[in-house]
Amino acid sequence: MKADRVREIPGPAGVLESLLEMPQGTPRAAVVFAHPLPTQGGTMHTKVVYQATKGLARIGCAVLRFNFRGVGLSAGTWDDGRGELDDYRAAIDFMAAQHPGLELWAGGFSFGSYIATTVGADDDRVCALIAIAPPVHKYEFASVKLSAKPKFIVHGEHDELISLKAVRHFYAQLPEPKEMVEIDSANHLFDGQAGEVGDALANLLEDFTCRTP
């Protein structure tokens, strides 16, 4: 696997700084993975984002992670989630153009999972939704609750910000198909356990395809 820096993704507020992780061999899916809340220090280098990217690349995915507007070298300023939705749409456009014909999956961590699954649920090009520690206490996830696309959730048992009970309740409201993994003893940032997130995604999605038999 090799990480290549990409500086030319055009975003609605200017260039978005990003990294593209390519798997060994021909990729079987293209994934855009979004980072947690910028106002709390979230970036594309957050450990969970890094490990999720590595886990998905191990199972053959081309994975793009990027900094939202105003983060790192990305142009623009924080827009309270509105502009960040547009940033994610721009990243989806980029990956769809770079990898035509591949399945396109939308994923993210915490705030990034809200952005990714909301955009992904409404974009016909996206066929799978991935949410790590979804902030269901803060956002409605209305589009996700109506989506018939496959949904994959990973959450920490001891998440101090978003209770496992709340996420279980959210999961129960989601239509099939869906799968959820709970990581024992993990807090919101999966401190000391970020690698388990990558492993969980690899196990969940290793044999997954959006295509029906």
Image: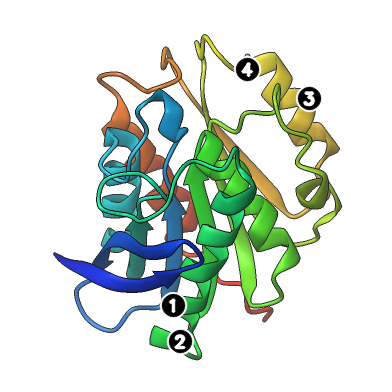
Callout 1 amino acid: Phe
Element type at mark 3: helix
Residue 150: tell me if it is visible.
no
Q: CA distance from mark 4 to mark 2?
A: 37 Å
Q: What residue is disc 4 on?
A: 164
**Residue that extends furthest to the bottom in the rendered view of this protein:** 101
- Tags 3 and 2 in contact by the CB under 8 Å rule? no
SS class, disc 4 = helix
Earlier-in-chain disc, 1 versus 4: 1
| Residue found 40% across the figure and 65% down from its top | 14
Q: CA distance from mark 1 to mark 4?
A: 34 Å
Dot placed on the residue nearer the N-terminal end, 4 or 2: 2
Q: Residues within 10 Å of mark 3 (few under 14, many from 20)?
A: few
Residue type of the residue flagged with mark 4? Leu
Gap in angstroms between the C-alphas marked 2 and 1: 5 Å
Q: Give the alpha-carbon distance from disc 3 to disc 4, as whole Å.
A: 9 Å
- Residue 140 lies, with reference to residue 31, above or below; the image says above
Q: Nearer the viewer, residue 152 or 62?
A: 62
Reading the image, the residue beneath label 1 is 94
Q: Confirm or deny contact between disc 2 and disc 1 (CB under 8 A).
A: yes
In this view, the mark in front (4 or 2): 2
Q: Amino acid at mark 2?
A: Ala
The C terminus lies in which quarter of the figure?
A: bottom right
Taking the spot 62% from the left edge, 28% from the top edge, the residue there is 135
Q: Which residue appears at 25% of the width and 20% of the height?
A: 192
Identified at 80% across, 57% down, the residue is 147
